[in-house]
Image: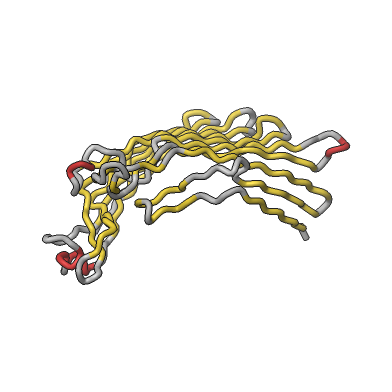
Amino acid sequence: MLLPRAGLTYALLDNLNYFASYSQGFRPINPQYIKYPERYGRTEPFSNETSYQMETGFKGEFFQKALFATLAVYQIEKRNTLVNTGLFTDEGNPVYRQNGKARSQGAELELTGNIMANLNLNASYAFNHTEVLNADVVAETGMMAANAPRHSAGLWAKYTFTSPALRGVGLAIGGNYLSRRRMEIQVNSVGSGELIWDYWPSYAVANAALFYNVNKFKFSFNLNNVLDEQYFVGGYDYFRASPGAPRNFMTTIGYTF
């Protein structure tokens, strides 16, 4: 199978570049799903997954190369995505279904560098519009793809003190945000028992750090999930879920030889 890839970069200015890329993908499935589809809940053979991705945007360096910025827009399309229904056949084999097409279109912005000599910033934001097309389950057609947030953002800012009394001491704060995400398979409503598409709620997690550098030693203390937020990273349903870590901390001591 031929999987073409192409890329282009062009310098618009000394500090600004344009880029574009295109690629196709292929993901083979288990040959058993093609030869014996009835063992996995399907009357016709499953198909291998194919995809393509297009991306274009700009990369720039600003404020005498102190700040780097990337702005990109993209479109990704996947065909024949295999979905585990969470069910099993009488023989104990997992039951799968296969969506015809899913498309993602979005934009990403990333900033990284030094706002000041002692203030470092890393910030990002992404908008992602996803849509399932030609779904195996009719009710899923037109819905957002599973586990795909529409909005996501991250921030990490690090400040190093320059006064003689606090030289070598630094603070860092930041966190990340994800909007709600749809579960991959339907679940039963608590009230009525009917099958519905449920969602993992949005969440924001804050992190902080304190560090101290002296000579060749580096001491750091990281506090993750400062507010002890209860959240789910994602999952297929309530039985196959990935909860986020509660508040935790880590200390490290390093030495450069």
Foreground pick, 64 / 54 = 54
Q: Residue at x 66, y 46 (%)?
A: 223
Q: Indicate the position of residue 47 as horizontal and vertical percent values.
A: 19, 58
Foreground pick, 141 / 170 = 141
Q: Indicate the position of residue 185 as horizontal and vertical percent values.
A: 29, 50
Foreground pick, 165 / 202 = 202
Q: Is residue 25 left or right of residue 224?
A: left
Q: Quadrant of residue 116?
A: top right
What is the residue that sits farthest to the front in this orientation? Answer: 191
Q: How many numbered marks have been drawn onto this rendered protein structure?
A: 0
Looking at the rendered image, the quarter that the N terminus falls into is bottom left
Q: Indicate the position of residue 56 as horizontal and vertical percent values.
A: 39, 36
Q: Residue at x 74, y 46 (%)?
A: 211
Q: Is residue 140 left or right of residue 68?
A: left
Q: Residue at x 55, y 51 (%)?
A: 245
What is the residue that sits farthest to the bottom in this orientation? Answer: 91
Taking the image as drawn, is residue 150 in sight? yes
Taking the image as drawn, is residue 10 in sight? no
Q: Residue at x 16, y 65 (%)?
A: 37
Q: Quadrant of residue 194?
A: top left
What is the residue that sits farthest to the right in this orientation? Answer: 165
Foreground pick, 30 / 109 = 30
Q: Quadrant of residue 42?
A: bottom left
